[in-house]
Image (tube, helix red, strand yellow):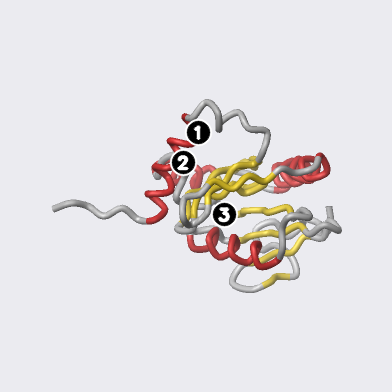
Amino acid sequence: MPTTKTHAEEHQEQWQEIVADPILRDLPYKVETNHRGQIVLSPHKNQHSRQQKKIEKRLDSLLQSGEAFQEWAIATSGGTKQADAIWASDERRAEMEKTGDPTTLAPEICVEVMSASNDWDEMEAKMALYRDAGADEVWVVDETGRVHFFADEELEQSDRAPDFPDTI
């Protein structure tokens, strides 16, 4: 009896083709796919990269037994997305690695840094995809640097990293 692939597994397979393509793998842009498997390119400004680095460093300093990363690919039911920053416990990262590359299991914390090309509708869609893939929290940093923390609903502060500032 043939096995049926989930949408996330289909996106995961397609992602392997994208990263193997010598033309696409060296693009200077954030590359994601949408729910149709179409490639979406997102160039961003240097300020965006600085904010990602600040988030990564702060998460690493606040949380033990895990690690923060930038531009982490997650195969979701709505395409492969690259969270701007993530934090995963050592245990979760081991579970994530078992699902393949890109992972189909989201880390505990996924962070998106908004730029002029983003809007809240897009952020809400990404939040839902990350949460459906298993993220405990999704944070959105708006263009003013304010950090919005979300779990089942918006939080005043992160449950996972309560000392993380609300502005970066």
The residue mark sitting in front, 3 or 1, is 1
Any part of residue 4 in sight: yes
Q: Disc 3 vs disc 1: Cβ atoms closer than 8 Å?
A: no
Q: Percent position (x, y) of residue 83?
A: 62, 49
Q: Nearer the viewer, residue 84 or 166?
A: 84
Q: What is the x, y in percent for residue 11?
A: 43, 48
Identity of the residue drawn at 81% across and 39% down: 46
Residue sitting at x 59%, y 72%: 152
Precedes in sequence: disc 3 or disc 1:
1
Q: Position of residue 143 (x, y in %)?
A: 82, 57
Name the mark on residue 19: 1
Residue found at the far bottom of this picture: 153
Would residue 88 be visible to someone looking at this image?
no
Task: From the top left corner, tell me how far across and down residue 73 is, in percent.
Answer: 54, 44
Q: Secondary structure at mark 1?
A: helix
Residue neighbourhood size for the residue with mark 2, other residues' Cα within 10 Å, grouped as few (<14), some (14–19), many (≥20):
many
Q: Label 3, label 2: how many angstroms apart (C-alpha)?
A: 22 Å
| Label 3 with label 2: CB-CB less than 8 Å | no
Give amino acid for label 3: Glu
Instruction: Check disc 1 and give the amino acid type.
Output: Val
Most foreground residue, 110 or 161: 110
Q: Is residue 119 above or below residue 37?
A: below
Left or right side of 77 for 72: right
For disc 3, the marked residue is 108
- Quarter location, residue 14: top left
Q: CA distance from mark 2 to mark 1?
A: 6 Å
User: What is the C-alpha distance between the residues marked 3 and 1?
Assistant: 25 Å
User: Which residue, as the protein is rendered here, is positioned at the far left?
Assistant: 1
Q: Which residue is mark 2?
A: 15
* The quarter of the displayed image where residue 99 is located: top left
Task: In the displayed orientation, state which residue is furthest to the top.
Answer: 22
